[in-house]
Image: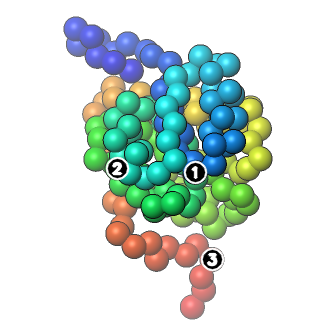
Amino acid sequence: MRRIAGLCVATPPSVLLVSPESGARTLLQSILQKAQCRTLACARCRDAADLIHLASAVICERVLPDGSWLDVLRAARALSPAPALIVTARPADAGLWAEVLHFGGYDVLAQPFRAEEVMWAVKGAHGRWAAEAGTGASQRPAVPEQTAFRPYAFR
């Protein structure tokens, strides 16, 4: 959503794909471009930090060569509105999903990707970004330097 003369104007999702695997990036680009989404792609946290301001949604691998999805989430949070983050993993488990939601990520996508699930997640993430752009408010928790969140750790 962009503001033109004080009005909010809808735009198609612009999605940043962050994955060290070129095959995953290519597959996601193919799925998203069929739905008229704009895509940007990179393999590292460092590159994501340089491109993230251009995105309304980010699809990011759990582990990257120079960090993790938490590093990308921190970069996103520096922006207003912050692009919504979707984390991918093989396998994607309930613990990861709980951790992503706890720290303010939008969703988790399991690999291999299914086009319908990718599009559902991206449309929702873009909607979250657009709502934040319209209100200027964010209610997401702070992202810690080191994560100690363990949803299934009992003492």
Residue with the most extreme front position:
22
**Residue ranking furthest to the left:** 5
At 36% across and 67% down in the image, what residue appears? 144
Q: Amino acid at mark 1?
A: Pro
**Left or right: 90 in relation to 29:** right
* Residue named by callout 1: 20
Q: Quick one: label 3, few (<14), some, or many (20+) residues within 10 Å?
A: few
Q: Residues within 10 Å of mark 2 (few under 14, many from 20)?
A: many
Q: Residue at x 56, y 61 (%)?
A: 63
Q: Amino acid at mark 2?
A: Ala
Q: Split into 4 quadrants, where in the image is the C terminus?
A: bottom right
Label 2, on which residue? 75
Question: Relative to 18, is 53 on the left or the right?
Answer: left
Check whether the beta carbons of the residues at disc 3 and disc 1 lie within 8 A of each other: no
| Residue 79 spot, x, y in % from top left | 29, 41
Q: CA distance from mark 2 to mark 3?
A: 27 Å
What distance separates the C-alpha of mark 2 from that of mark 1?
18 Å
Q: Residue at x 51, y 36 (%)?
A: 41
Q: Is residue 134 above or below residue 58?
A: above
Q: Mark 3 — residue?
A: 152
Judged by depth in the image, the label closer to the viewer, 2 or 1, is 1
CB-based contact (under 8 Å), mark 2 and mark 3 = no
Percent from the top left, x then y, of residue 120?
66, 33
The residue sitting at 34% across, 29% down in the picture is 133
Q: Tell me the CA gap for discs 3 and 1.
A: 29 Å
Task: State how the image is colored.
Answer: rainbow
Place of residue 126 in the rendered image (x, y in percent of width and height, measured from the top left): 49, 30
Element under disc 2: helix
